[in-house]
Image (cartoon, helix red, strand yellow):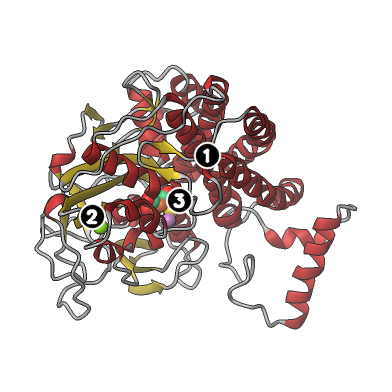
Amino acid sequence: MSTKIDINPLTRIEGHLAIKLEIDSGQVTRAYCAGEMFRGIETILRGRSPLDAQQITQRICGVCPISHGMASLKAQEQAYQVVLTDNGRLMRNLILGANYIQSHIMHFYHLSALDFIDITAILEYRGADAALLDLQAWVKAQFASKSIFPGAPFLPRYKGDYLQDLDVNIGAIKHYLEALEMRAMAQEALALFAAKAPHPTALIPGGVTEKATAKKIAAYASILARLRTFIERVYLPDVVAVASAFPAYFKLGKGCGNFLAFGAFDQGDGGLFLPGGRLTQGQAAPVDQAKITEDTTTAFFSSPSGLHPFAGDSTPAPHKPGAYSWLKAPRYEDQPYEVGPLARMLVAHQAGHAQAKPLIAGLLGKLGLDAGDLDSVMGRHAARALECKLVAEACAGWLARLQPGQPTFADFNLPASGKGVGLTEAPRGALGHWIEIADHKIKNYQCVVPTTWNSSPRDAKGVAGPIEQALRGAPVADSDNPIEAARVVRSFDPCLACAVH
Ligand code: NFE
Ligand code: MG
């Protein structure tokens, strides 16, 4: 028997995402991802000073503002032909690195872990930890009042096959609370060099306006040491514990088989710490941004379909027949691509990355898996955690190379006209900004954003986006509690606020 269900909104993600599923004999046969709102930030930018762009585009998101700022600066720097100073480049790596750390920790503990661990286990807690006892009292009160507020972080929730090990469950709940502190500390670390978080003011074309002082370097180092301890001793072991308890999720949620990374973290020698590249059905290939287009066939935009971002347009058409999402469908050579930590780790692995390759091999060996199993729900969680460790380690190296007293930005002249492409990696994947300047004003500005790739709707050929494809075939044992489908979607860490921009 065929059933249709709507998960709307899908909670514990950023922004407003509706998932529509068609289910036959307990399996998803068709899935649709719909972005539920229009924001129009690309349109707001037209006619403004190009120097406003890195501030306005940061407002696309409170989770990954850094990445939008960086993409905007890279696009402007190409247009202005300005080259960063060494300190400026290193400080930007440290700012972006701290942003990855807070984002990845949040995604696991605050957004995804509750799909696997049993929050009601807290009711059985008999220890003396004050924060856990507070939480226990709160959960008890929710049950006693039976008026569980739907917006609460923990309850209600889908019924499901949650983890049964009391120690692991209580440990994970404790780590949920610790992870809140880690996030705050990572934001403090990036604010040392970016002036504030979120939405830093110190990011300017040519570098960063904050100084690299010995005091700031020491403060960042002390926070980074605590973050690295948490990543190694808490985050990675928890991901391994959940992965070991749910091995079926290494076989579930396979995406479209195409992976794209632009690469990020300039090393100063022309290379990037996280390399760019593509993997298409297992074959490695380079990336040429000229081959990116956005399909608008099923998107609520009257803009022509299949335009490159330099020719892009985002005119809303809320009543467009056949449309079902406020996301355009980005395509590379007309194909959908998955972006994010899994794409980056697979591209790095394929490129023989000195640190990533042994780390991935170690994890696969520990879990008795092979690289093909990574294209899955649990593979995405594992890739994100490994990347978090890699980036935190790299931050220590960049910090050591900062030179107090040396310039943190380079001067430049503003041209009356120009064009630039800014490609980087946000925590959730490949991010591109395209700017065209005429008469000292922004003539056109287009963003192609990680979650727009991953949550994209169907294109002119009817090809579904990566999340839509990953949902196909997913089991749904109980259509009132589609926890398996929610786990598939959350493994991509979607941010619909970004995606609709
Ligand atoms: Ni709103 Fe973002 C990241 C960007 S997701 S979180 O990471 O760009 O599309
Ligand atoms: Mg766009």
Q: Residue at x 69, y 49 (%)?
A: 181
Identify the disc placed on residue 446.
2
Point out the image quarter for the N terminus. Answer: bottom left
Q: Amino acid at mark 3?
A: Cys
The residue at label 3 has a CB less than 8 Å from ligand 1: yes
Residue 40 falls left or right of residue 444? right
Q: Which residue is mark 1?
A: 210
Quick one: 409 or 168, which is closer to the camera? 409
Measured Cα–Cα span from mark 1 to mark 2: 28 Å
Say which label, 3 or 1, has the lower sequence index: 3
The residue at label 2 has a CB less than 8 Å from ligand 2: yes
> Vertical placement of 492 versus 220: above or below?
below
Measured Cα–Cα span from mark 2 to mark 3: 17 Å
User: Are there few (<14), some (14-19), or many (20+) residues within 10 Å of tag 3?
Assistant: many
Quick one: 368 or 171, which is closer to the camera? 171
x, y (%) of residue 25?
36, 65
Give yes or no for contact between labels 2 and 3 (Cβ–Cβ under 8 Å): no
Residue 37 falls left or right of residue 63? left
Number of residue marks: 3
Q: Amino acid at mark 2?
A: Gln
Q: Amino acid at mark 1?
A: Glu
Q: Which residue is mark 3?
A: 64
Q: Can residue 22 be seen?
A: no
